[in-house]
Amino acid sequence: MSLQIVLALVASFLTLWQADRPPDALALINKVSQRYAEAKSYHIEAIEERSATSELSRSWQKFMMTAIVMPDGRFRYEGFSTVGKSFLISNGKQEWEYIPGRKAYTQQNLPTESSATRPIHAPEGVIAQNAKQIVVSLAQIAGNLKSASYLPDEAIIFEDKKIDCYVVHVSERDFKAQRPFSARESTVWIDKARLVIIKRTEKVEPVTKNPDAPWRVFSSDVLTTYPVVDLNAQEPDSVFAFVPPKDAVRVEDFSAPDKGIGWLMGKLAPEIRFRGPDGKLTTLSSLKGKPVFLDFWASWCGPCNSAIPDLLSLYAKTLPQGLTWIGIDSDTNPDAAEKFARAQSIPWPNYHDADGSMGAAFLRQTIPLGVLLDANGKIIFYKPIYQVSELRGAIATLGPQFATAVGTGEN
């Protein structure tokens, strides 16, 4: 067979292969992302598998989440992981939080404060809150992309059903801001018929090594599949009804003692060190003379994410008064938190708790955790899964200028 014939066959194959594709992969991702952003009702189920590997360790976690939302205030969020299982349910008139492992539930009449901002006292409760972020993350998937490219189309099988997909690949060079010490690759599978994402992978590899502590350098992989995606869901009323099991008891909340509250409140903050992107070290004690707020968080934490708009408003009011803000993330890799912070335009510095030492120093058991120090370095506010209104009240006690700045009303 002559070279001309081979080239003609290849050209013919490529023409057929690309015939049903939108011409621009980035435009396709933007279109799909916009569909999620505009969704008023939806039923989405997600299975997320996270793995992280260093020279001396390997970890793996699996999360199963469901988000069902109607435009009239009805919703059902479910989460299941090694931490446990939890449910957040609303029929538009009442709202329940149910944790099967504790055989207990809460019940509130609506209207009440949003489940996104209401304090979640149980670690299991964070899993259901994370389910609330499914649509948010997919709606933002195109936010930081500069370019994208097609991979060969694929077919994915879900429960014996074949789904033909566009496959779009994005590498680190396609992000507006780059991280010099790591390389990122991301791929999404888009259902051709419905233009929804049914599979997503993200891989982060370190570019530079840490010869002093190689076990702190992680590569990470995240695989998320979406076996159920319906952006125009119409669910029966029974989905949003909650009938307490016979062995479940109603409680006011899922409060549990937190040793940090008893052991650290009113005492000088423990010493921790922050290492900036330039490698420069700063100690917490060196910040004495001004009050400091420490926010322990993670990009995957639903309650952390929900608080950001109010925190940004509070930051703008308190920075001129001299309050220093510092974020400390517990993501598996620093890229995830850094990318999220950029997307949300978070202005305060953030430091990655690579070995967990900063969280351990403050006896962190869950996130978010808010810690406020006065100008002498004494802890005057220590609250796991705090509300911004609680933080605002604590800041007001720092002095008249802070009380005037934050007021007593909304942020």
Image (cartoon, rainbow, N blue to C red):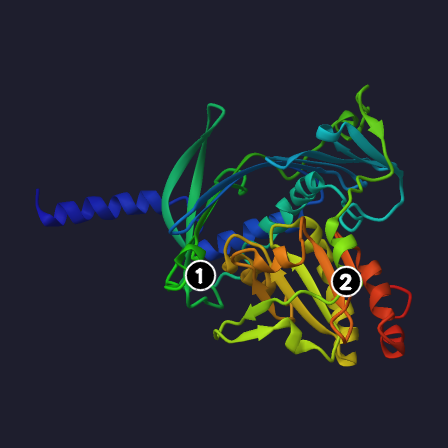
Residue 270 lies in quadrant: bottom right
Q: Quickly name the residue at label 1.
A: 147
Image spot of residue 100 (x, y percent): 72, 28
Image spot of residue 386 (x, y percent): 77, 54
- Label of residue 310 in the image: 2
Residue at 79 percent across and 21 percent down: it is 245
Residue at 84 percent across and 60 percent down: it is 389
Residue at 71 percent across and 29 percent down: it is 101
* Above or below for 61 versus 332: above
Residue at 74 percent across and 78 percent down: it is 290
Single out the residue that lies furthest toward the top.
246
Neighbourhood count class around disc 1 (C-alpha, 10 Å): few under 14, some 14–19, many 20 upward: some
Taking 166 as reference, is 388 left or right? right
In the rendered image, the quadrant that contains the N terminus is: top left
In the rendered image, the quadrant that contains the C terminus is: bottom right
Choose the circle earlier in sequence order: 1 or 2: 1
Callout 2, which amino acid?
A: Asp
Neighbourhood count class around disc 2 (C-alpha, 10 Å): few under 14, some 14–19, many 20 upward: some
Single out the residue that lies furthest toward the left.
2
Taking 74 as reference, is 136 left or right? left
Callout 1, which amino acid?
A: Ser
Mark 1 and 2 residues: CB-CB less than 8 Å, in contact? no
Image spot of residue 232 (x, y percent): 67, 37
Dot 2 falls on a residue whose secondary structure is helix
Question: In front: mark 1 or mark 2?
Answer: 2
Cα separation, mark 1 vs mark 2, equals 32 Å
